[in-house]
Amino acid sequence: MSKYEVRQVDLWLDQNESEAVQACLERRWLTEGPACKDLTKTLQDYTGCEYVTFAPNGTLGLFLALLALDLPQGAEVLVPSFTFYGSVTPIIFAGLKPVFVDVDPASFSATQENFEQARSDKTAAIMPVHMYGGCSNIEDITNWAKEQNIRVVEDAAQAMGAKFQGKALGSFGDVGVISLFSDKVITAGEGAIVLCRNTELYERVLLTRNQGRRHSGTFQHDALGMNFRITDIQAAVANGQMGKIDAIVSDRHKKWALYSEKLSNIKDLSFMTWIPGCQAVPFRFPVLTQQRQELAAALEKNGVETRRMFMPMHQQPRLRSYAQGNLPVSERLYDTGLCLPIHKNLSVSDVSRVCHAIRSFYGA
Ligand SMILES: *Cc1c(COP(=O)(O)O)cnc(C)c1O
């Protein structure tokens, strides 16, 4: 159990999930089966993407996407430095070279300009990452990439339910990945949703994830593949969560509005913005402050668990060799960024308590 009264992450589980899992056990079918089929259908409707499949987690989903794209060995993949480690290591394990780009100081996500600046004739793919449930102009980015004959692997790990101009984040790239890890918008404990742009890519992803064949139980393998399948228990949990998705999304918006209202007009506090056209789903409530450490300590004293933002990838011990200079926005976000919790089990009075502690810290 957590030592914090207000936790950074908490799960909303009820009979929705337990009944779905129970049904799996009673069917005595635990590999991909009826629950996966139901989840696929639900997600096709929800995301508007026809080509839906799964991976054991977001990191492996990105790895699967890169393998299925079959890019030339050693080719460059442009990826924001300000992201989670799991965006980058799949690039290296796939035999490709990460090239780090900076991000936009308002949306915290990389823009077309960020990618354009780092582009070279070795660039085979880009990996836009939608940060904290918002995004940059992903439509411009994917249009530009298409013109340049560059592939797009979309890291929508944090962006379940979010859209840009009415289209689901995760469905813009050649392949998009939404994580189902425990701290994400919806969860299966571990897991990921993989969205593909067309039948051809979908077929390649399906072969790569299932040992190079379309159907289990057959032993001729026509392609190289591994096992990126999930269990029907994971899918059952995700089905339970999808039954509550609208409530989850609106709850996050309600708390975002509450934070925004109660934290307004504090001189040393600034926020991320959602660009026009972005229908975000708040993943955390990120704030930027020159007194990050002191504010975190003050909140800790009040029983509130905060998290830092991502340490830039170009500064990570094992990734520094790929760095090509400073990326000031990513560095500044790490220095000044703090995440406040935003989840279903957070009550309105919890949010008030967090905001009250912050206002008294600033004497505001
Ligand atoms: C969580 C996350 C991942 C990795 O997903 P897992 O399911 O935890 O492997 C990748 N990228 C970003 C931006 C994430 O937040």
Image (cartoon, rainbow, N blue to C red):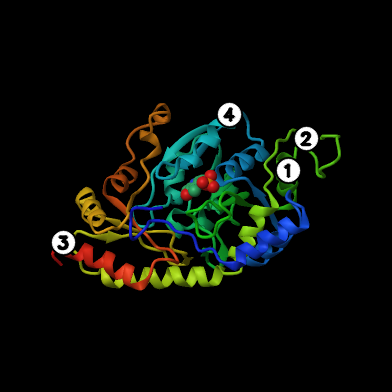
Q: Which residue is mark 3?
A: 362
Q: Which residue is mark 2?
A: 223
Identify the amino acid type marked 1. Answer: Arg
Within-10-Å neighbours for mark 4: few <14, some 14–19, many 20+ = some
Q: Earlier in the sequence, mark 4 or mark 1?
A: 4
Dot 2 falls on a residue whose secondary structure is: loop
Between the residue at mark 2 and the residue at mark 3, the CA separation in whole angstroms equals: 60 Å
Instruction: Name which residue lies at 26% across and 60% down.
Output: 270
- Specify the quadrant of the image occupied by residue 254: bottom left
Between the residue at mark 4 and the residue at mark 1, the CA separation in whole angstroms equals: 18 Å
The mark closer to the camera, 2 or 3, is: 3
Classify 342 as above or below 32. below
Q: Are marks 1 and 2 in contact (CB under 8 Å)?
A: yes
Side of 45 relative to 295 (left or right):
right
Q: Earlier in the sequence, mark 2 or mark 3?
A: 2
Q: Which residue is mark 1?
A: 204
Q: Earlier in the sequence, mark 2 or mark 4?
A: 4
Identify the amino acid type marked 4. Answer: Gly
Q: Earlier in the sequence, mark 4 or mark 3?
A: 4
Classify 143 as above or below 19. above
Q: Position of residue 131 (x, y in %)?
A: 44, 53
The mark closer to the camera, 4 or 3, is: 3
Instruction: Name which residue lies at 47% across and 67% down.
Output: 277
Q: Earlier in the sequence, mark 1 or mark 2?
A: 1
Q: Position of residue 159 (x, y in %)?
A: 51, 58
Between the residue at mark 2 and the residue at mark 4, the CA separation in whole angstroms equals: 18 Å
Between the residue at mark 1 and the residue at mark 3, the CA separation in whole angstroms equals: 54 Å
